[in-house]
């Protein structure tokens, strides 16, 4: 997701600074300003100048058995990002959370809710996206559920859950992220699955 977002932001004329592990600088899209650092540590000095800090750090391929990683990586990284954003006087934080409540992935949801709560008391303006599952390279198997979602979205007593826990694709997520970067929130703003799906339509061409 990060590479796709960076490419789109660069194409739209934004300057992008990306925090990367030492030695990974060459993996970034051309035109990105790479800064080497630890996303789980103190990187506030590496942030300026910036209008928006985008947090995309998380445990790869999350599953119910990765509760320890969620707390060690997902939670610690948003704690570090909030601290960095406050110290660097960044005006807007962009955080990818998760749709909730939900019947599964309780440890993951709990950590993302902690991240949301941390942002809420930080004093930062923020946009918080709440997808459920993002379809993309290596993450396409839930697409077999699309006919079931189509039906559930049309039944009154399942519609709300089906929309809140619906599937979005990578292009929709990137559009939602770009839209948030270009239209920073005042206070804390949330965008769920319906808003994420609608982002591609709302985003003006580069």
Image (cartoon, rainbow, N blue to C red):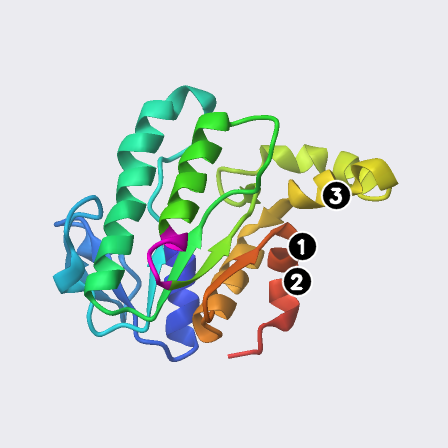
Q: Please name which of the two marks, 2 or 3, marks the residue nearer to the observer.
A: 3
Q: Residue at x 86, y 41 (%)?
A: 156
For residue 132, which quarter of the picture?
top right
- Residue 40 picture location, percent across and down: 21, 44
Q: Answer whether labels 2 and 1 touch (C-beta < 8 Å).
A: yes
Q: Secondary structure at mark 1?
A: helix
- Residue 88 picture location, percent across and down: 20, 67
Give whichever of discs 2 and 3 has the lower sequence position.
Answer: 3
Task: Decide: is 67 above or below 100.
Answer: above
Bounds of the magenta span? 119-124
- The answer to whether any part of residue 118 appears in the image is yes
- Residue 171 picture location, percent across and down: 55, 57
- Residue 74 picture location, percent across and down: 33, 39
Mark 2 — residue?
Answer: 198
Mark 3 — residue?
Answer: 160
Q: CA distance from mark 2 to mark 1?
A: 6 Å
123 falls in the magenta region: yes
Mark 1 — residue?
Answer: 194
């Amino acid at each position: 997701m990060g590479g796709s977002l960076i490419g789109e932001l660069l194409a739209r004329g934004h300057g992008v600074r990306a925090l990367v592990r030492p030695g990974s600088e060459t993996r970034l899209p051309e035109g990105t300003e790479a800064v080497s650092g630890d996303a789980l540590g103190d990187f506030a000095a590496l942030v300026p100048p910036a209008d928006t800090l985008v947090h995309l750090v998380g445990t790869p391929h999350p599953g119910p058995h990765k509760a320890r990683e969620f707390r060690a990586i997902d939670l610690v990284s948003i704690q570090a990002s909030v601290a960095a954003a406050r110290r660097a006087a960044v005006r807007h934080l962009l955080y990818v959370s998760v749709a909730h409540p939900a019947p599964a992935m309780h440890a993951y949801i709990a950590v993302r809710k902690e991240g949301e709560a941390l942002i809420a008391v930080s004093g930062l303006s923020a946009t918080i996206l709440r997808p459920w599952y993002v379809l993309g390279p290596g993450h396409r198997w839930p697409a077999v559920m699309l006919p079931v979602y189509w039906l559930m979205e049309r039944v009154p007593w399942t519609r709300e859950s089906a929309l809140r826990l619906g599937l979005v694709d990578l292009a929709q997520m990137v559009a939602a992220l770009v839209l948030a970067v270009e239209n920073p929130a005042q206070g804390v703003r949330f965008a769920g699955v319906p808003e994420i799906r609608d982002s591609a339509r709302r985003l003006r061409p580069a």
